Amino acid sequence: MSGQGAFSEMKVDIVRILKKIPPGRVVTYGSIAKFLTISARHVAYILAGFSPTESKELPWHRVVGAQGWIKKDQKSGVERQASMLRKEGIQCKNHRLDLSQYEIKIKDLKTGLAGGKNYKEAALRKAAKSSP
């Protein structure tokens, strides 16, 4: 239960970050992970688990891999993501973009998040409050 609660809390914070990334700018899985003190794999896992509705409504395409790589593990997703980024004016070459030109720092997004949250402890506290 606490593991699911922790992932739910992580997802809420990741979505909050995504909603603040402006068109034409990107962040990396690693920068989200570092800010939230979680694994970049957790960020990728949560993004990959978005429902079709969430995928349409949230700018998941503005999250790229280290060194500006676009979702290189999923061939069909690469072209979709590259196309969405190009529509926002981001130039991609060989499924890669120039982070020095397009990356925005998480701290500059004004998410209202402090970062460094301990998700496991937060989930345990929440579970304890809801217990009879």
Image (spheres, grey):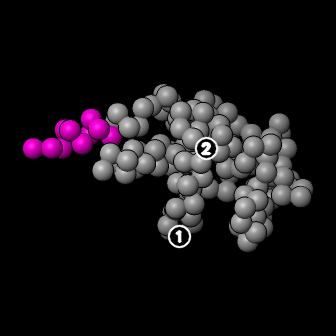
The quarter holding residue 67 reads top right
Mark found first going from the N terminus, 2 or 1: 2
Q: Is residue 122 visible?
A: yes
**What mark, if any, has residue 91 been given in the picture?**
none
Q: Are marks 2 and 1 in contact (CB under 8 Å)?
A: no
Magenta segment, principal secondary structure? helix
Nearer the camera: disc 2 or disc 1 = 2
Kindly identify the residue that appears in the image at 18 percent across and 44 percent down: 130
At label 2, which amino acid type do we have?
A: Ala
The quarter holding residue 105 reads top right
**What mark, if any, has residue 40 been given in the picture?**
2
At label 1, which amino acid type do we have?
A: Pro
**Residue hosting label 1:** 52
Tag 2 secondary structure: helix
Give the percent coordinates (x, y) of residue 14.
Answer: 52, 45
Tell me if 76 is positioned left or right of 123 in this view. Answer: right
Give the percent coordinates (x, y) of residue 79.
Answer: 78, 67
In the rendered image, the vertical position of residue 91 relative to residue 39, given as above or below: below
In the rendered image, the vertical position of residue 114 relative to residue 26, given as above or below: above
Tell me if 7 is positioned left or right of 66 in this view. Answer: left
In the rendered image, the vertical position of residue 75 relative to residue 2, given as above or below: below
Residue at the extreme right: 93
Q: Is residue 125 magenta?
A: yes
How many circles with numbers are drawn on the protein? 2
